[in-house]
Image (spheres, rainbow, N blue to C red):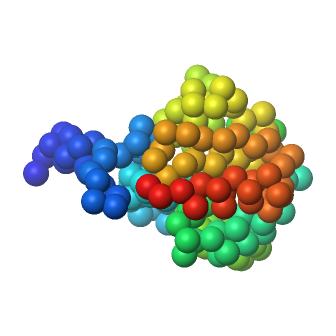
Amino acid sequence: MNPARLAALAALSLFTFGGTAMACPNVLNLQTKNLAGQAINLCDYAGKVVLAVNTASFCGNTPQYKGLESLYQKYKDKGLVVVGFPANDFGSQEPGTAKEIKDFCELTYGVKFPMLEKSSVVPGKANPVFAELAKMTGETPGWNFHKYVIARDGKRAFSFSARTQPESSDIVRQIETLLAEKP
């Protein structure tokens, strides 16, 4: 099958939630690679609560990986997926290769949640997910470790600054509220 046909089929992919078919939400309509170079289709996360965060290995906020991984382990079986978007946009604090970033995350913080290939998250250059999240929330990352919590239906997103710790009561409350909603 030719690549254009495959792309068209992927765009039309349907997901079933509680007997209702729905198309992949715009916010998750991204095919990319993870840090190991394997293909990732974010539409696979439709129907889950997604915590999207722009990450960097050499930032004062880098220890937030620990809290992100803790949230992922605590809620992944209930429908949460944490997705890391390494970006070198702020202070050039993510200069490494995919392998260097992957090794750092796994060896230093035990990261097991999906980490995608490096991309940009700033307006004008943002990857499609962060561009859509900026439209949805009216907020863009001002630094590394800006967090967005996306509802299961992909129609609502909530923005949290880089200063907000992953395990803060505000983020946990938002995740728990969205996990309790039926898709």
| Residue 117 or residue 114, whichever sits in front | 114
Q: Is residue 133 left or right of residue 27?
A: right
Q: Position of residue 87 (x, y in %)?
A: 66, 45
Q: Quadrant of the C terminus?
A: bottom left
- Judge whether residue 99 can be spotted in this image: no
Say how many tags the image has. Answer: 0
Residue occupying the point 19% across, 46% down: 9
Residue 30 can be seen in this image: yes
Work out whether residue 16 or residue 101 is closer to the camera in this orientation and state it: 16
Q: Is residue 139 above or below residue 79?
A: above
Q: Residue furthest top?
A: 124
Residue at the spot x=69%, y=53% of the render?
Answer: 174
Q: Is residue 9 left or right of residue 113?
A: left
| Viewer-side residue, 38 vs 66 | 66
Q: Residue 99 location in percent, x, y?
A: 59, 64
Residue at position x 80%, y 62% in the image: 167
Residue 24 lies left or right of residue 120; in this view the side is left
Is 127 on the left-hand or right-hand side of 167?
A: left
The residue sitting at 10% across, 51% down in the picture is 1
- Give the x, y percent position of residue 109: 75, 72
